Image (tube, grey):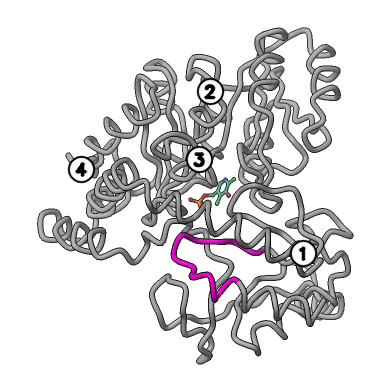
C-alpha cells in the first residue's frame, strides 16, 4: 500500500483535500450545517421535493406496507410490487417500452456498458461526462475514446475510424458541473450515420426539462427510438433515491440477465419506490414547481449579470462561476459559508485543471431574497 499519510498531506497542501460537512436538517433551502444556519445553493433537489409532505407521507405508507428493507436482490425475492409499478410508470412517462430500476445512478451507468459491450467494441464519451459514465466505459472492456466537450466534429471523426465492433456514444444530457446541454439532435444524427448506439444520462434533466418534466427527449423533441439507452436518476429533481434505465424490451431483459450492478446488489427499499411514484405524480401534475425553478434561474442570471459576475451560458439549474485557481475557489466557498451561504467549491479531478469553480444550483424553493443576498455576497468576494 502507498504511504497514505504522505498522500493525504499532499492533498491538503494542494487544497484538494475533501471534507464532509454535517447537516442536521432535511434537504431544504434553509439548513443547519456544521452547526451553522446557511442558505443552500448546492443541492440537486431542484424542485424542492426531497422534504415534500406528500412524499414523506407516501414513504411512511410504503414502510407500513413493506417494512424498511427489501431483504434481497431483485432476482431473489427483493423485487416488490412497488418497484414493479414504478418501472411501468417510468417507461410510460419517458415513452419507452420498458424501464429497469437500479439502486443508484452510478450503478446503472456501470452496469449498462458492461452488459451490452465487450472486447472489440468502442465507447465514445464526452470529456466532461460524469465519472460514472467514464467508469462504466472502462469496466465494459470496450475501447474508450473521449472527445472534447460537445465537439461533435471530433466525435464524427472518431466514429469514422471505428470500422468493426459495436459503437456506443455516451453523453450527459445536462452536464453536471457546467449545466450546459448536449446537442442531442446532432448526437442522434451522428449515431444514425455511423451505425452507433446513443446512451444519454439525463440525471439533471429528468423532472425539470421538457413537457411535464419528462426530460431531455421531450425538451429536444427527439423520439425515444433515436436514443436506445436512456438513463435518469431519482435522487435529484425527483427527491428520492435510485435510478433507472429505459429502453427496448430486449435491452431491459439483457440488463436483467447481465448487468452485474443490477444482479449482485440488494433491491432499494420498496418504500422509496412508493415515495418515487408520488413524486412522479407531482412532477406530472404540478407544473408550478418547474415554472418556479425556471423563474429562479432567470432571476439569478439577471441579478448576476447586473452585478457583472462571470456566469456561464447555462440555461439550467446548474449555474457555475469558474474561478480557476483551486485555493481561491476554496477560500471564496468558505467565506460564503461564514456569511451563511452554502455553495460548494468543485475542484479537479471532478473538473479539468484550471477550471475550479463555485457550483451554484438553484431550486424552485429559493425565494427572490435568497438569490439577491447570494449575488450581493458573491459580488463582494469575487
Ligand atoms: C449524480 C449523477 C449520477 C449518479 O447518480 P446517483 O444516483 O447519485 O448515483 C450519474 N450521472 C450523472 C450525470 C449525475 O449527475
| Image position of 146 with respect to 279: above or below | above
Q: Give the quarter of the figure containing the C terminus.
A: bottom right
Tell me the CA gap for discs 1 and 4.
Answer: 40 Å
Label 4: element kind: helix
Q: Residue 222 carries which label?
A: none
Do the numbered discs 3 and 1 sit on residues whose CB atoms are within 8 Å?
no
Discs 3/4, front: 3
Q: In which quadrant is the N terminus drawn?
A: bottom right
Q: Seen in the image, is 37 located left or right of residue 193?
A: left
Residue 254: horizontal and vertical position, in percent? 42, 21
The segment highlighted magenta reads 360-371
Q: Mark 3 points at which residue?
A: 209
Identified at 71% across, 70% down, the residue is 345
Q: Earlier in the sequence, mark 2 or mark 3?
A: 3
Distance from the alpha carbon under mark 2 to that under mark 3: 11 Å
Looking at the image, tell me whether mark 3 or mark 1 is earlier in sequence order: 3
Side of 325 relative to 126 (left or right) = right
Image position, residue 352 (x, y; %): 83, 53
Provide residue 128's location: percent of width, then percent of height: 74, 44
What residue is pinned by disc 4?
82
> Which residue lies under the disc numbered 1?
357
Q: Distance between the residues labelled 3 and 4?
A: 25 Å
Residue of label 2 = 221
Q: Distance between the residues labelled 3 and 1?
A: 24 Å
The quadrant in which residue 175 appears is top right
Distance between the alpha carbons at the discs numbered 2 and 1: 32 Å
Instruction: Say which label, 1 or 4, has the lower sequence index.
Output: 4
- Residue at screen point 77% across, 76% down: 379
Amino acid at each position: 500500500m502507498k504511504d497514505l499519510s504522505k498522500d493525504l498531506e499532499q492533498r491538503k497542501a494542494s487544497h484538494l483535500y475533501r471534507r464532509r460537512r454535517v447537516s442536521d436538517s432535511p434537504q431544504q433551502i434553509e439548513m443547519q450545517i456544521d452547526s451553522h444556519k446557511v442558505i443552500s445553493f448546492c443541492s440537486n433537489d431542484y424542485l424542492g421535493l426531497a422534504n415534500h409532505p406528500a412524499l414523506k407521507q407516501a414513504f411512511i405508507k410504503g414502510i407500513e406496507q413493506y417494512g424498511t428493507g427489501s431483504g434481497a436482490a431483485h432476482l431473489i425475492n427483493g423485487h416488490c410490487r412497488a418497484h414493479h409499478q414504478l418501472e411501468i410508470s417510468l417507461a410510460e412517462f419517458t415513452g419507452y417500452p420498458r424501464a429497469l430500476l437500479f439502486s443508484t445512478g452510478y450503478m446503472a451507468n456501470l452496469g449498462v456498458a458492461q452488459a451490452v459491450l465487450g472486447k472489440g467494441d468502442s465507447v465514445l464519451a464526452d470529456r466532461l461526462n460524469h465519472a460514472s459514465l467514464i467508469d462504466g466505459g472502462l469496466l465494459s472492456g470496450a475501447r474508450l475514446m473521449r472527445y472534447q466537450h460537445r465537439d461533435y466534429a471530433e466525435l464524427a471523426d472518431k466514429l469514422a475510424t471505428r470500422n468493426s465492433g459495436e459503437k456506443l456514444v455516451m453523453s450527459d444530457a445536462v452536464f453536471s458541473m457546467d449545466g450546459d446541454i448536449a446537442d442531442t439532435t446532432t448526437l442522434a444524427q451522428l449515431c444514425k450515420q455511423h451505425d452507433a448506439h446513443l446512451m444519454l444520462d439525463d440525471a439533471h434533466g429528468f423532472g425539470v426539462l421538457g413537457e411535464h418534466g419528462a426530460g431531455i427527449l421531450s425538451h429536444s423533441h427527439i423520439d425515444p427510438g433515436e436514443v436506445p439507452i436512456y438513463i435518469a436518476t431519482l435522487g435529484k429533481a425527483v427527491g428520492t433515491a435510485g435510478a433507472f434505465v429505459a429502453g427496448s424490451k430486449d435491452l431491459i431483459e439483457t440488463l436483467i440477465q447481465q448487468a452485474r450492478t443490477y444482479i449482485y446488489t440488494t433491491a432499494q427499499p420498496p418504500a422509496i419506490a412508493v415515495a418515487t411514484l408520488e413524486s412522479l405524480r407531482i412532477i406530472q401534475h404540478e407544473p408550478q414547481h418547474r415554472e418556479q425553478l425556471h423563474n429562479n434561474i432567470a432571476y439569478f442570471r439577471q441579478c448576476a449579470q447586473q452585478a457583472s459576475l462571470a456566469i456561464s451560458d447555462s440555461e439550467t439549474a446548474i449555474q457555475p462561476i469558474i474561478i480557476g485557481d483551486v485555493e481561491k475557489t476554496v477560500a471564496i466557498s468558505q467565506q460564503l459559508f461564514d456569511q451563511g451561504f452554502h455553495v460548494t467549491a468543485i475542484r479537479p479531478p471532478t473538473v479539468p485543471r484550471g477550471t475550479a469553480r463555485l457550483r451554484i444550483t438553484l431550486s424552485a424553493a429559493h425565494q427572490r431574497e435568497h438569490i439577491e443576498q447570494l449575488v450581493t455576497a458573491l459580488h463582494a468576494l469575487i
